[in-house]
Each structure stands twice: as C-alpha cells, then as structure tokens.
Image: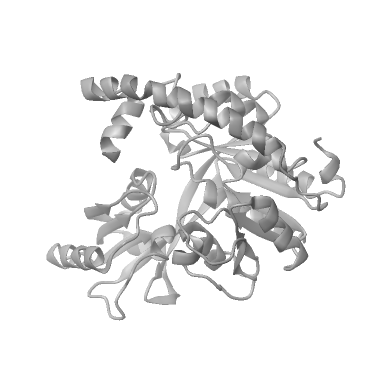
Amino acid sequence: MHRLLRRAWRREGVDGRVLHVLLLPASWAYGAAATVHRAWRRRLPRLERGVPVVLVGNLTVGGTGKTPVAIAAADRLRQLGRRPAVISRGYGGRRGADPAVVSDGRAVLLDAAAAGDEPVMMARRLAGIPVVVGRDRVAASRLAVDRLGARSLVLDDGFQQRARFPGALRILTVNATDPFGGGPGVLDAALLPAGGLREPARALCEADLVVVTHSWTGGDAVVRLMDRIRTAAPCAAVVRAEHWLTGLSDAAHPGSVRPVGWLRGRTVVALAAVADPWPFERRLQGCGARLAASCIRPDHHRWTPREVERAFDEAVRLGADAIVTTGKDAVRLPIPARPPVPVLVAEVEVRFESDRERSQFRDAIAMCAGPRSALRRG
C-alpha cells in the first residue's frame, strides 16, 4: 500500500495516475482542514519566554533529513554558550505525562516506546543537552526553560508551529530528490493524501533559511530547484547540505565505534524503517560496502523480535559481516545480548557543500541567538 501511494504521489503508471485523481477530493478536504487548523493555532498561547528559538521542519512527509539539521543547530547554540534544549512532539510515544523530559542533559530518562524514536536518538547523540517531548510544543518549551534551565530552544519538526513562536529562526529542509512530495519532475505536487505536501509549497516564503538536503544529485536539477526556492522565498538564504556517515557504533557495545573505512569490501545487510531508505543504502555503497540485502519497513515501524531474528538469519545465510541500521532504528531494535553478527549503527552528521554555505548556516543561528533575537520578527 505504501508503495502504491508513492506511485500516486509521483503519478507513475496508469494505477498511480488513477489513484492520484481518486485521492484529490480528500486532498482538497485536507487543505481546508489544515487552513482552519492554522487559523486556530494562531489563537493559541505563544511562548512568552525571551529565549532564542530555532524551528526546523519541512513541507513534506518525512525523508528530508531535518533531524540531523536540528542536531547541528543545537550543537551551534551550545558552541555559542546559549544552553539549548531540543523540543519534539514525540511521535509514536506512549507516556503517562505530557510534556515529559526525555533527557535532562545528564541521563536519558525515557525509552522509544514512551518518547518516540527520534527524541531518544537525539538524547543519546546530544550529551549535555536536554530533550523534552510534548504534543503542546509551547508547554514543552516552558518546561525546558523553567525546570531545566534552557536558554535557547530547537524545535525538531517545528516549522508548522511558527505562529506560536514569534521571532523564531525558521529553517526548512527540502529533499533535492523529491522536493515537494511528488517526485523530482512534479512541480505541482498535491497535499496529502494525493501528494506528499503537509502544507502548500507557497509556505516557502515564510522560511528564513532553506537547507537543500541530498544535494549529491547535483547538476542542473539542483541548480533549477535552488533557483525556484529563491524565487518563492526571496528573503531566505538557500544552502546545500549532505548527510555524511562519520562512524559505525556497535549497538551491543555503545562505546565501540568503527571507522567508516571498515565498510570497504565488507558484505552488509541494511535494516531501516525511515521515510526514504534509498539515501541510507546509497551511503553504505558509497563507502565501499557490498549491500547483500535490505530489510525495509515504513517510517517509525516497531521492530518485533521475530523480524529481527529473520534479519539475522538472512545475514548469516548471506555471509554478511554486519547488519547496518540507522540511529533512529537502533533505539527500537530488540537486539539479543549476543547477536550472531554485529549490529552497527550509522552515525550521520550534516556537512554543507561549501565553506560559504556552512558559514551562512552558522551565522543564521548566531544572529538568532543574539541579545535582540526576540525582537527580530513580530
């Protein structure tokens, strides 16, 4: 079903085009409901604490690499001495209290079942930085400031919260391979469910910074995309970035990290439940690994012990040197104490295409964190 829906978004084949047309009325209804919801959100209480806020998000459903960009923003605020906290909705988590503290900066206090996979992944990655989840992002932000002493905030998947955070730096991530949820060649992509857009593409004009991810596609296509974004968002800086594999941590022994060069000539099985697994597989192959098989599931999938056991059986049968998974999947995997083959977690970070683009990103965060940041935008 997921694959057929993607074909409808991209209008591929007769079945994809027919399903796209059939879904258009639901897409129009979604757009009307989203407009009402945005109007309602503008009437909700805003964050009144005078702290710098960075909103990182996207216009489409998943696959843009926004969470590594949020991590980079939090790291930059820490370098500036602004004591950041990360705020997330905590999608998929089931917890008794909301908002809730995933990490107080010293220890990870909730697991993925309670907090969701991405908040736990960020809590493990960002030692010393608190992570808070909450359906009401303003309430979660207040908790971070009042109880945890945060002096700046990064909202992961926060672009749609912009009405409640006046003065925030608004960062949008756009996947160069599928910028508007309808495939690289579809410029008039539709809203959900007929297309992959969460809100109309004209919302680009409300961004301060647009990060074009998966820019390895290169060539004229990326140049045209960036020109189109600059036209739609004339006041925004537009930069290109790639997600680089920096190391492989052992899921059974978290302190053990293998260099990326270890992959060269090795046979691996990829295991991923993310919105767009193709860049992950490409990254492994680009580092010299031989991809013997892939075990792919929908985004945020909860792996069962039986599924993991079958993945191990396949890896052993193929003579794989390791199973390689994503940081997001690692917090959900029921891994046995002594796995038959190593389970390695791909550690990823954002790297910009040029020093100039890296400086633009860092300078935008620094300007947001300045003493008058709260007055920058009304």
- Residue 305 in percent (x, y) is at 26, 69
Instruction: Give the answer, above or below, for where 153 lies relative to 9.
Output: below
Colouring scheme, one of rainbow, by chain, secondary structure, one colour = one colour
Residue drawn where x is 32% and y is 72% of the image: 335
Please give left or right for residue 274 compared with residue 359 in the image: left
Q: Relative to 136, say whether 376 is above or below.
A: above
Q: Is residue 222 left or right of residue 378?
A: left
Q: Nearer the viewer, residue 273 or 34?
A: 34
Q: In front here: 117 or 74? A: 117
Front-most of residues 65 and 41: 41
Q: Is residue 222 visible?
A: no
Q: Give the farthest residue toward the left.
A: 317
Residue 185 falls in image quadrant: top left
Q: Name the residue nearer the viewer: 194 or 251.
A: 194
The image shows a total of numbered marks equal to 0
Q: Position of residue 64 (x, y in %)?
A: 48, 41
Visible in this render: residue 186?
yes
Where is residue 363? Give x, y as percent.
Answer: 73, 44
From this view, report whether residue 7 is shown above or below residue 262.
Answer: above
The residue drawn where x is 26% and y is 61% is 266
In the image, taking residue 268 as reference, residue 231 lies left or right, namely right
Q: In which quadrant will I find the N terminus?
A: top left
For the C terminus, the image quarter is top right
Q: Residue at x 40, y 61 (%)?
A: 260
Residue 220 is drawn in which quadrant?
top left
**Residue 246 location (% of width, % of height):** 47, 59
